[in-house]
Image (cartoon, rainbow, N blue to C red):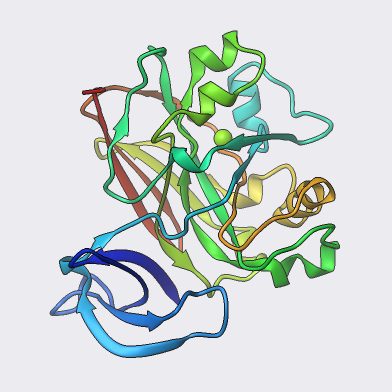
Amino acid sequence: MRIARFSIDGNVAFGVVEGEPSDQDGPVIDIIKGHPFAEFERSGQKVPLSKVRLLPPVLPNKVVGIGRNYAEHAAELGNEVPEVPVVFFKPSTSVIGPGDPVTYPSFSSEVHYEAELAVVIGRMCREVPRERVKDVILGYTCGNDITARDAQRSEKQWARAKGFDTSCPLGPWVETDIDLTRAADLGIMCTVNGEQRQLGRTSEMVRPIEDLIVHITEAMTLLPGDVVLTGTPAGVGPLSVGDEVAVTIEGIGTLTNKVIKRG
Ligand code: MG
């Protein structure tokens, strides 16, 4: 099931996306009563997807990023795969939705895309044992861990480089029908202006999703709607003002954002 968050006539709601773009009238959203983190009911009230504005599928309290989780990507930037996973935060204020603009930050002249599988947490959890990881995941969405690479190199912590406003596009919706086995082998692609820049599979992750959730929750509580970005495959590169960047993940969908100048 694809759960989207959207606005229509000034109201914000969650809904289940039904149908495909190829359908005669396109996909529709069945508005749900309440929120998707508990048992919910579909209202049966349906609106065409084309008539709503999709929002970030969740409003995370925190986005936890994992660095250098694909060996080829670590190597392309001259880094080793770390012995202990690199964990960083992207603040809630960095999150934007599908179609929202990425604003090129004033302090950088080297902003990169990073296509990533985003894990959406479904329930409050801490010290999650490996075998319970499946129970704390609501589903998966596409993420773009936009990074000011020059600031990442020159500053010891990555808070500015990876945490600036609009640096965390998420969407287009949360796919809940993917289990951990399937999530461990999904195609992941990034295009810029329609041209392919990254193409990998989540099976290339150095540390699987289970290990990441165990590692993170050893230290901190994850809340419903929190997001874990699982790292990016090789092929990262620069974005310029005017570019359209799209992250596509097999079985989930495509997240598209345009880069604009700070106005
Ligand atoms: Mg990343």
Say which of 192 and 170 sits in front. Answer: 170
Visible in this render: residue 233? no
Query: At 84% across and 57% down in the image, what residue appears?
Result: 127
Query: At 60% across and 58% down in the image, what residue appears?
Result: 185
Question: Looking at the image, is 8 positioned above or below residue 168?
Answer: below
Q: Picture coordinates of residue 41 (x, y %)?
A: 44, 89
Query: At 84% across and 31% down in the image, what residue appears?
Result: 83
- Residue at the extreme front: 10
- Residue at the extreme top: 154
Q: Is residue 152 left or right of residue 111?
A: right
Visible in this render: residue 93? yes
Say which of 2 and 198 sits in front. Answer: 2
Q: Picture coordinates of residue 255 (x, y %)?
A: 35, 50
Q: Is residue 107 left or right of residue 154?
A: left
Query: For the N terminus, which image quadrant?
Result: bottom left
Query: At 61% across and 12% down in the image, what residue appears?
Result: 155
Query: For the C terminus, which image quadrant?
Result: top left
Q: Picture coordinates of residue 259 (x, y %)?
A: 27, 31
Question: Looking at the image, is 2 positioned above or below residue 95?
Answer: below
